[in-house]
Amino acid sequence: MDPHLLRTFVAVSRLASFSAAAAELGYTQAAVSQQVAALENDLKVPLLTRRPVRPTEAGRCLLDHAVPILLRLDAARADVMRLAGGPPGRLRVGASPLAATGLADALARVQASVPRLEVAVRVAARDAVAAAVAEGELDAGLVDGVVAPSDPLRLSETSPLTAISTAEDEVVVALPWSHPLARRAGLSLPDLADARWIDAPAAAAPLGDLRWVAGTDGFRAALRYDGTDLYTLGALVAAGHGLSLLPGPVAGRLAGVRAVPVTSPRLLYRTELLHGSTPPDSPVAALAATLGQRLPGAPHSPRRSSAPTP
Amino acid sequence: MDPHLLRTFVAVSRLASFSAAAAELGYTQAAVSQQVAALENDLKVPLLTRRPVRPTEAGRCLLDHAVPILLRLDAARADVMRLAGGPPGRLRVGASPLAATGLADALARVQASVPRLEVAVRVAARDAVAAAVAEGELDAGLVDGVVAPSDPLRLSETSPLTAISTAEDEVVVALPWSHPLARRAGLSLPDLADARWIDAPAAAAPLGDLRWVAGTDGFRAALRYDGTDLYTLGALVAAGHGLSLLPGPVAGRLAGVRAVPVTSPRLLYRTELLHGSTPPDSPVAALAATLGQRLPGAPHSPRRSSAPTP
DNA sequence: GATGATTACGGACGCCGTAAGCATA
DNA sequence: TATGCTTACGGCGTCCGTAATCATC
């Protein structure tokens, strides 16, 4: 169960070829063959069929474990080395599209307090941001989502990250003006499970979040929008392609759509700042302080610690 | 970042001694010293202070990652080999104390349907059961806890396990008859946050669960009871040492205590069956079927899949 | 001075590359 | 027949154990 063997096994499975994996990893075909054989020998189970190269049942099972394990190993290395490296002169921040809104101000204030700070910003999907922070590719990430008041955001955690709540907004449904429910003052989420929804995981709340907080299988996507642009999303809603769940302040700025608050169940659109272990004098700590909250607890024990902002 | 190195690093940290770790792992002191040096050299960070042997800040950070990683590696091996081993002639089941109640009947029915089946039962704390199932020391585990209706149990997951809801009971507060709230017909959980509570993680709902579902910092323990015996717990409640949260059917059988349902928020005392990847003809599948639910989805992709029982 | 971690050195094993073998499309 | 995985073998590096060295209590 050497990580080296796991890594080549994953590569072979993904590429469905020993030789391609060898090329990618800088080995010879023979070495890859031996590594896979060693793994199969260790587990006493054939993991791959040859010709065509495809994972067996046991192989798929191992893949389900191996990928997170390898991610976690990388995250561990990144976390430790980041802690040891001392405060770097740069701050690489990621954000999911809706969370990116409030970032500019905060970054300006951090730059004012830390001289000669290189800042890089990257916008990506929520889970991608979380993964990049875990891997150490980013120093911090701002992510958002729909949650019940006391719950943390549900992220696919490769490794434990410290999470700080930085903003909590009202949750609203964006509807076209012509929609029968558009004149309501408030809406109940379960009533909307069977409506037409737009799945815009990169721009609005992913429908998976809705299913989670509502505890149903509904909220099926009538249209999928993979862009991040909110005005396109607004246009899609206005044109009647479906509904979308958004934070109140954002939805209020969209033209042609009606924003109706969700009154039941009680929900919040929360933004959280994610980061790994961090020395207290780092730019990340400054960013966390700027976004309204001091870094909690000991930086060496990264655990979820969310507290609502006042 | 060889797991071998991580394992010895963890052992050295735990035992605070190179030589003790060497003895435990079957190495010489010199080998352990070299392994730790190799790890520190790889990460370019001192991980341990010598004399006394104690993890540095970076070392503690690495420990936070290394322990779950090693558990997960073991879980992966166990999961794959279990899948490959074919249906074994034995069924090792673990259960948390309250969940163990309904196990006898189900096991009898499984034994009736599978000839010559060796059955072993082990009762332990909830997280210990989950860990043992992940590690493959147990084939399945029954665990219980307090949750909101649509949430899964919050387990410290080393590796993803399939979870099936097998029972859902009313949640009640066990109070002494003399308690001012004992005559109420129903209680609201937030009102009880500041009451005296008994923390009995091995027998009743852990107080951490209450804090989670209530979203508060309350529910502080006035007394901790580490046993699993429910009648002792009942006696403690009756004597006024504190309150305890229990499933309705269990609390009803305790002498001298009053059981008042929790009406707000809406909570359930749920029991879930946990298992790893499993061939469809295994005793685990039989147990799952007996407990009221077929094995869902493909056995090679272990994910949480809970559905309420009717 | 004794306990215990580190450094030095030699042997064994493991792992990769080259090259030949072999099965399948 | 050709592509591509497997097996055979040789060299190199890694890792462990023994033994000597060094540091701390």
Image (cartoon, coloured by chain):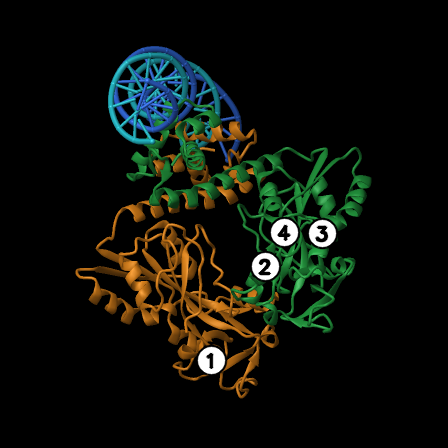
Chain colours: A orange, B green, C blue, D cyan
Choose the circle earlier in sequence order: 4 or 3.
4
Residue A131 place in picture, x, y as percent: 40, 54
Tell whether label 1 touches label 3 (CB within 8 Å). Answer: no
Residue at which label 2 appears = B222
Q: Secondary structure at mark 1?
A: loop
> Is there any visible trace of residue B78 in the rendered image?
yes
Residue A154's disc is none
Residue B245 place in picture, x, y as percent: 66, 61
Disc 2 marks which amino acid? Ala
Q: Secondary structure at mark 2?
A: strand
Residue at which label 3 appears = B232
**Nearer the observer, disc 2 or disc 1?**
2
Name the residue at 51% across, 43% down: A65
Residue B225's disc is 4
> Is there any visible trace of residue B308 in the rendered image?
no
Tell whether label 2 touches label 3 (CB within 8 Å). Answer: no
